[in-house]
Amino acid sequence: MAAPLRIVAVANQKGGVGKTTTSVNLATALAACGRKVLLIDFDPQGNASTGLGIVDRKFNSYRLVTSGCSAREAVQSTLVPRLDIIPAVVDLSAAEVELTDMERREYQLADGISGICSEYQYVIIDCPPSLGMLTVNSLTAATSVLVPLQCEFYALEGLTQLMHTIEAVRAGLNPHLLMQGIVLTMYDTRNRLSSMVANDVRGHLGHLVYDTVIPRNVRVSEAPSFGQPVLMYDLKCPGSQAYAALAAEVLTQERHAA
Ligand SMILES: Nc1ncnc2c1ncn2[C@@H]1O[C@H](COP(=O)(O)OP(=O)(O)OP(=O)(O)O)[C@@H](O)[C@H]1O
Ligand SMILES: [Mg+2]
């Protein structure tokens, strides 16, 4: 039997914590495990699209949510087998305002992709670093939220606000929204602070935190400039191995939920 569809919003309003890196590489690792995956770049910065070397962005997530094109038009394949993408352009920042005046404003992404979701087992949404309309649309469309947390001093700051937003979406817009998990990113083994933060986060939220920790690894930060996921750029590096392990944990969750 085919695995049920999971729509995972990768969200944290804090900037630069590893949302895009996690979206691109988890999507790639799941595709490598045989899943059909759609990555939606839902950040006006368009980093996920750049990280996958996507040049043609005529049809994009901005046009999708402002009724300028269909999901089928917006989807394109990537260099990764079984991984498709809906790219983003900077115009998407205008959607934060434009969506506000629309009917069913929180459902524009959910409605936009509803016709094509059945073709995938995973849809991964790379959210922008804010809790505005774009992130609310992502959480409304999603079946679960995955939160990357950077192993630094203020890691837990802002998490409360994110949890409130998730609760608010659950209360009104999407009652079935689950917590997929928290993944610790940019872990530096040489830095005592990293292990202190990791222990602190596990102490508070242990049941939600993945065993896999993503290490700080220069190969991870180099890969996007070659338009490749790190799993293609250097499969053997610690960052790639960690994202493969994270995907294995996600697939284990899938089996337990079945
Ligand atoms: N494990 C890692 N090792 C080294 N560098 C990393 C790692 N993960 C992410 N980076 C780098 O850190 C920066 C921020 O990562 P990323 O773009 O994934 O964060 P983000 O949360 O999506 O940022 P934004 O909030 O701006 O969208 C990038 O330059 C990325 O290449
Ligand atoms: Mg990003």
Image (cartoon, rainbow, N blue to C red):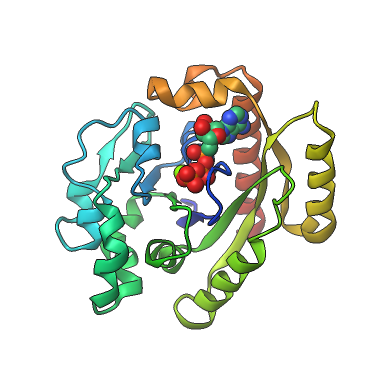
Comparing 120 with 198, the one in front is: 198
Comparing 173 with 14, the one in front is: 14
Q: Position of residue 184 (x, y in %)?
A: 69, 44
Report the side of 114 relative to 14 (left or right): left
Q: Is residue 113 above or below residue 55?
A: below
The total of numbered circles placed on residues is 0
The residue sitting at 55% across, 59% down in the picture is: 145
Quarter of the image for the C terminus: give it. bottom right
The residue sitting at 54% across, 61% down in the picture is: 144
The residue sitting at 46% across, 51% down in the picture is: 2
Q: Position of residue 78 (x, y in %)?
A: 32, 31
Q: Residue furthest front?
A: 153
Q: Position of residue 232 (x, y in %)?
A: 47, 21
Q: Position of residue 209 (x, y in %)?
A: 73, 52
Report the side of 91 relative to 85 (left or right): left
The residue sitting at 38% across, 35% down in the picture is: 82
Q: Residue furthest bottom?
A: 172
Find residue 245 and report its image quarter: top right
Report the side of 31 relative to 211 (left or right): left
Q: Is residue 29 visible?
A: no
Q: Is residue 112 above or below residue 125?
A: below
Comparing 16 with 6, the one in front is: 16
Comparing 2 with 229, the one in front is: 229
Report the side of 17 relative to 79 (left or right): right
Q: Is residue 74 visible?
A: yes
